[in-house]
Image: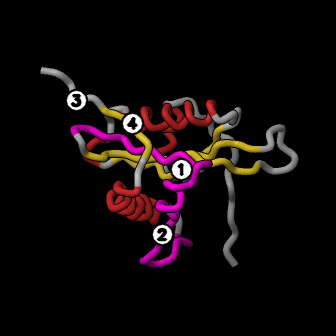
Amino acid sequence: MSTPVVSIRTATLEDLPVLLAFEQEIIKAERPFDITIKEDPVSYYDLGQMIQDSKAHVVVAELDGKIVASGYAIPKKARHYLDHEWYAYLGFMYTDENYRGRGINALVVEALKQWSVKNGFKEIRLTVYSDNLPAIKAYEKVGFKKHIIEMRLAQ
């Protein structure tokens, strides 16, 4: 019996309903880590615009014709004091809970890393909540290292 193959491809506008549902799952998962997220309805991204943006790269992972994961890479301007002017920022990383633990996120990250290198980015960054240990572990597994912690003080 053959193992189903996961394919990574560029997202299209036809994928938008699934991607918008993924976005809501990300928000739901991140709410426990961030009390400052607004009440619903809330959206993090303009996914339709991002899919159509030639400078962005939105990908999906498909298994047996079903979209099971997503991610994007976008260029971001670095702070003026850093040794690079631009970097690739990864976000919108989501894997359907029924497909986790199969290395699909690693395939998405690899595709985004390849796009980043091909587009001249030597620096690749992402953000993750400090208490989101499963996400931190997944990103460390694909080569990311903890770099900085952002702190906040509510008045």
Is residue 25 visible in the rendered image? The answer is no
Q: Residue placed farthest to the top in the image?
A: 1
Q: Which mark is residue 43?
A: 2
Distance CA(mark 1)–CA(mark 2): 14 Å
Q: Is residue 1 above or below residue 68?
A: above
Return the residue nearer the eye: 44 or 59. Answer: 59
In the image, the segment drawn in magenta is 35-64
Question: Mark 3 and 2 residues: CB-CB less than 8 Å, in contact?
Answer: no
Say which amino acid is labelled 2.
Answer: Ser
Q: Which comes sooner in the sequence, label 2 or label 4?
A: 4
**Residue 52 counted in the magenta span:** yes
Q: CA distance from mark 4 to mark 3?
A: 13 Å
Q: Nearer the viewer, mark 4 or mark 3?
A: 4
Residues at badges 4 and 3 in contact (C-beta under 8 Å)? no
Few, some or many residues within 10 Å of mark 1 (<14, 14–19, 20+)? some
Q: Identity of the amino acid at label 4?
A: Ile
Q: Earlier in the sequence, mark 3 or mark 2?
A: 3
Q: Which residue carries the number 3 mark?
A: 4
